[in-house]
Amino acid sequence: MKKSYRIAFIDIDWTILNHKDHSFDMPSIESIRKMQEKGVLIYFCTARTYISAKNTGLFDLIKPDGMICTNGGLIFVEDKLIKAKTYPEDIVKAVLKTANRHHVVLEFATIKEKYFTNEINQYVLNYHSIYYEKMPEVRKNAITDVTEILAFIPEKYDEKLTKELPQGIRYYRYDTYGVNLGYYQNQKGEAVTYLLDYLKIDKNKALAIGDSEDDISMFEAVGTAIAMGNAKTDLVKEKATIVTDTIDDHGVATIIANLILDN
């Protein structure tokens, strides 16, 4: 007998979006649709901003019941924002001042949009060629409602900027040209717990699927945690209840068929 679930939290990158060819795993998308038709609430849970998730084309394939973005900094139920963490404006000003001093292009994300702080350069182009992101517009003096800051720079800038950025900014390089300048210690798991309480759903009726260490806190907040076969580290698999197939082998579709669907 299939277990009865009420809600599923699903990561995007390398879980249903395969960056080998910048395409979605369509058998898994179809399985998610079928799961939703059976009454399971679908929440995508991602480190991406809202606009970044939208720009992948995911919402053209499936309309989720809600979203958790920026690793838990933003929570949407349907299209209604129920929780948001924004950077203090004095911190944003200080980060921008440091970046401008070194001619570094930043990307500011707000609740549902994003923009560059200066004209793009080769570092920005190199980054976006990998992540297949749409280029936002330039707004040089907008500093309100910022939920995430990205910098596009190679490693040679790391030592200099970490010394000059304001206290409280966490400098995290996640790509050759991509650096996250975080302020809040967002955790997917905290957002999942908050949302389950908001929706009055028991954690044992919830499942989560992901591939990276960012997903571990999400795993701990649900009753059934599923790691992708292509998980980035062994720790991700160790923290999961179940390990499914890789994204190349349609791991999300496989586990949904095994746990929820009748075929």
Image (cartoon, rainbow, N blue to C red):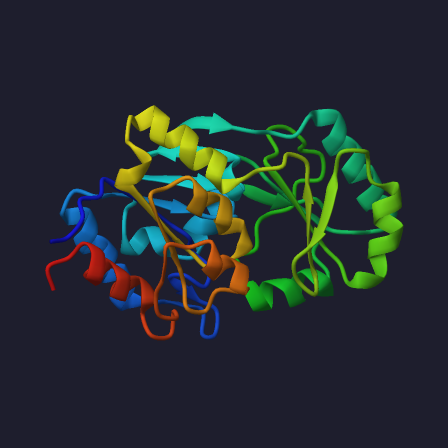
Using residue 26 as the reference point, say whether residue 91 is left or right of it: right
Residue plotted at (58% across, 68% down)? 129
Residue plotted at (72% across, 63% down)? 123
Percent position of residue 253, x then y: 26, 64
Camera-nearest residue between 230 and 108: 230
Residue 132 visible in rendering = no
Percent position of residue 12, x then y: 42, 55
Using residue 149 as the reference point, say whether residue 192 is left or right of it: left
To which quarter of the image does residue 90 belong?
top right
Residue plotted at (36% across, 55% down)? 58
Percent position of residue 3, x then y: 18, 48
Q: Is residue 244 above or below residue 173?
A: below
The number of callouts visible is 0
Q: Is residue 144 above or below residue 178?
A: above
Camera-nearest residue between 243 and 263: 243
Residue 99 visible in rendering = yes
Q: Is residue 63 above or below residue 91?
A: below
To which quarter of the image does residue 198 belong?
top left
Residue plotted at (15% across, 53% down)? 2
Camera-nearest residue between 16 and 187: 187
